[in-house]
Image (spheres, rainbow, N blue to C red):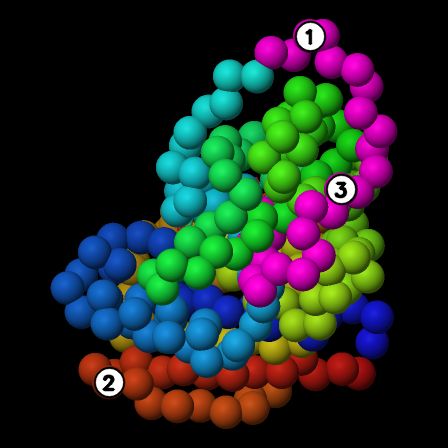
């Protein structure tokens, strides 16, 4: 395979919501801890999130104040700042909105994952210059729209990533499902029903995606967690 094996690793309520008030319930903390532990159990060097998730959890909405003028045009070619990192944090940020101030994300153990930005060619020269200044790697996934088949092949070719965890949110997961790129689904089921209908679900769709079609999975394993939770592992059923 010239692309990584792709695991979508997520936590949901009983009604398939990935965010919501159910996560504020006291017992939910145990399941979010389990989510992180299971992430580590997979031993993947690379994980990926959508722009909204990265903004919420890692850049905390920080806005860059980039001057847009006086920049020489920067060629829209991939930029590899570190091809031997121990870990990679991959941000899907088509138009370059994330306000990074360093080129790595640190986990609880102080280990830094090198950031790779996934961009379209619509990104500004100022943003590319900012990424180069911080030595943040970036790759182009399309002119105006992202093609994740191209993206994951580049991750394999340029960074030798052979196993990738796709970790939300719903729009990013939906994009991978849409391009039939999910090999395995790792789902932590929290025994709480969120109940609100406007909360983001496991797989969301957007107008720029193909018409979604049902995707079939086969159960690979199921493990009971404490307090009535489940860790379910499904693999994609190919026709
Ligand atoms: N329960 C869990 O396990 C879990 C895990 C992760 C995240 N979350 C939660 O999920 C929520 C966010 O989910 P979300 O679905 O709203 O956002 P998301 O998937 O994190 O990010 C969506 C954004 O990523 C970019 N993007 C993703 N796919 C794209 C595509 N095919 N083409 C172009 N751009 C694409 C776009 O950025 P632009 O808008 O810049 O164009 C899009 O708006 C957060 O609240 C987070 O806490 C939950």
Residue 105: give x, y in percent of width and height.
47, 50
Q: Quadrant of residue 32?
A: bottom left
For label 1, the SS is loop
Which mark, by number, is residue 226? Answer: 2
- Is residue 182 visible to us here? no
Chief SS of the magenta region: loop
Q: On the image, numbered disc 1 is attached to which residue?
A: 69
Distance of mark 1 from mark 2, alpha carbons?
56 Å
Residue 42 vertical position relative to residue 132 in the rendered view, above or below: below
* Residue 44 image offset from top left, x and y in percent: 57, 72
Left or right, residue 234 beside residue 222: right
Residue drawn 68% across the image and 26% down it: 129
The residue carrying mark 3 is 79
Q: Residue at x 83, y 76 (%)?
A: 1
Element class at badge 2? helix
The answer to whether the beta carbon of the residue marked 1 is less than 8 Å from any atom of ligand 1 is no
Which quarter of the figure has residue 45? bottom right
Lower sequence index among marks 3 and 2:
3
**CA–CA distance between discs 3 and 2?**
45 Å
Q: Is residue 1 left or right of residue 17?
A: right
Q: 196 and 107: which one is in front?
A: 107
Of the residues tagged 3 and 2, which is closer to the observer?
Answer: 3
Q: Which residues are magenta?
A: 67-91
Q: Is residue 50 above or below residue 195?
A: above
Quarter of the figure with residue 130: top right
Q: Secondary structure at mark 3?
A: loop
As displayed, is residue 152 above or below residue 136? below
Q: Residues within 10 Å of mark 3 (few under 14, many from 20)?
A: some
**Relative height, residue 220 to residue 7 (above, below):** below
């Amino acid at each position: 395979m010239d692309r990584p094996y792709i695991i979508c690793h997520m936590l949901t309520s009983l009604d398939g919501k990935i965010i919501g008030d159910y996560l504020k319930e006291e017992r939910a903390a145990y399941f979010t801890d389990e989510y992180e532990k299971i992430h580590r159990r997979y031993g993947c060097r690379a994980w990926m999130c959508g722009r909204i998730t990265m903004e919420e959890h890692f850049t905390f909405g920080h806005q860059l104040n980039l001057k847009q003028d006086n920049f020489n045009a920067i060629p829209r070619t991939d930029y590899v700042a570190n091809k031997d990192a121990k870990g990679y944090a991959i941000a899907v940020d088509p138009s370059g909105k994330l306000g990074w101030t360093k080129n790595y994300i640190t986990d609880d153990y102080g280990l830094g994952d090198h950031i790779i930005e996934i961009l379209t060619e619509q990104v500004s020269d100022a943003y590319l210059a900012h990424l180069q200044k911080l030595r943040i790697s970036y790759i182009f996934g399309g002119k105006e729209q992202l093609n994740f088949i191209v993206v994951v092949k580049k991750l394999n070719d340029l960074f030798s990533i052979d196993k990738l965890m796709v970790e939300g949110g719903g729009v990013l997961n939906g994009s991978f499902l849409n391009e039939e790129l999910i090999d395995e689904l790792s789902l932590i089921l929290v025994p709480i029903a969120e109940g609100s209908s406007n909360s983001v679900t496991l797989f969301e769709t957007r107008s720029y995606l193909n018409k979604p079609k049902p995707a079939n999975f086969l159960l690979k394993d199921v493990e009971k967690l404490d307090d009535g939770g489940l860790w379910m592992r499904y693999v994609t059923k190919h026709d």
